[in-house]
Amino acid sequence: EAQVTQNPRYLITVTGKKLTVTCSQNMNHEYMSWYRQDPGLGLRQIYYSMNVEVTDKGDVPEGYKVSRKEKRNFPLILESPSPNQTSLYFCASSLSTPTPSSYNSPLHFGNGTRLTVT
Amino acid sequence: GENVEQHPSTLSVQEGDSAVIKCTYSDSASNYFPWYKQELGKGPQLIIDIRSNVGEKKDQRIAVTLNKTAKHFSLHITETQPEDSAVYFCAALENTGTASKLTFGTGTRLQVTL
């Protein structure tokens, strides 16, 4: 089954303790992206990757790192989590960078990771 | 950059009635407008989209309209059913030069009551 898999689904941690949220897709997609969802703020892009070894900042990259060493994996790293990073996180992928011509390859989202930082 | 506003934030309708969710965008260069549905405990899923050279698009009970002059687009759901209850997000695709970027609205929680 074609899917984007995030782990873990739920994570409770303490301030300053490094963590990684994994994301893997089995659709051979070039484009991958991380979003955070907060009440009243919608989905905001953290980082994205247009291909292996190519990553770039989104709208809210502070406090996060990513890597894209393999096409299928795009982990999100919080080196020193803080309470303001408590949020619902989504990984997404598409065949190529979203453009009007790629409307047949929409963004596929994972089921989310709910992170609580105390 | 692009700014997408979405209204209302919550919407309650009776089963069988219609629901309309509206979005406005700021960047006249944006040219692709998808709508996503997020069910409880799941990630958003694309349900319909429209490009800037089209004014309206329908897919069974859902339709999207686009007014480029006014820079707003709307999602219309007719004959609503309980399974339509979800959070809906609009988005606008902005060409930033090096890459295109989707900017999402803040979401609308739709509740379809029996």
Image (cartoon, coloured by chain):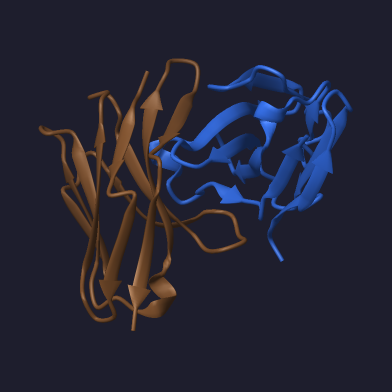
Residue in the picture at 72% in, 22% down: A64
Where is A10 relative to B51, above or below? below
Q: Quadrant of residue B51?
A: top left
Where is A33 relative to A109, above or below? above
Q: Position of residue A53 (x, y in %)?
A: 76, 22
- Of the 4 image quadrants, the one containing the N terminus of chain B is top left
Inspect this view and state whether residue B1 appears. yes
Residue in the picture at 40% in, 78% down: B82
Residue placed furthest toward the bottom:
B114
Q: Position of residue A76 (x, y in %)?
A: 76, 32
Check the rendered structure and report the hue given to chain B: brown
In the rendered structure, the answer to whether residue A54 lies left or right of residue B81 reads right
In the rendered structure, the answer to whether residue B47 lies left or right of residue A5 reads left
The foreground one among A22 and A30 is A22
- Of the 4 image quadrants, the one containing the C terminus of chain B is bottom left
The foreground one among B47 and A10 is A10
Inspect this view and state whether residue B59 appears. no
Residue in the picture at 78% in, 34% down: A118
Total residue callouts: 0
Residue placed furthest toward the left:
B69
Q: Quadrant of residue B78?
A: bottom left
Q: Position of residue A68 (x, y in %)?
A: 78, 29
- Tell me, by letter, which chain the rendering colours blue: A
The foreground one among B33 and A7 is A7
In the rendered structure, the answer to whether residue B58 lies left or right of residue A1 reads left
Residue placed furthest toward the right:
A17
The foreground one among B14 and B52 is B14
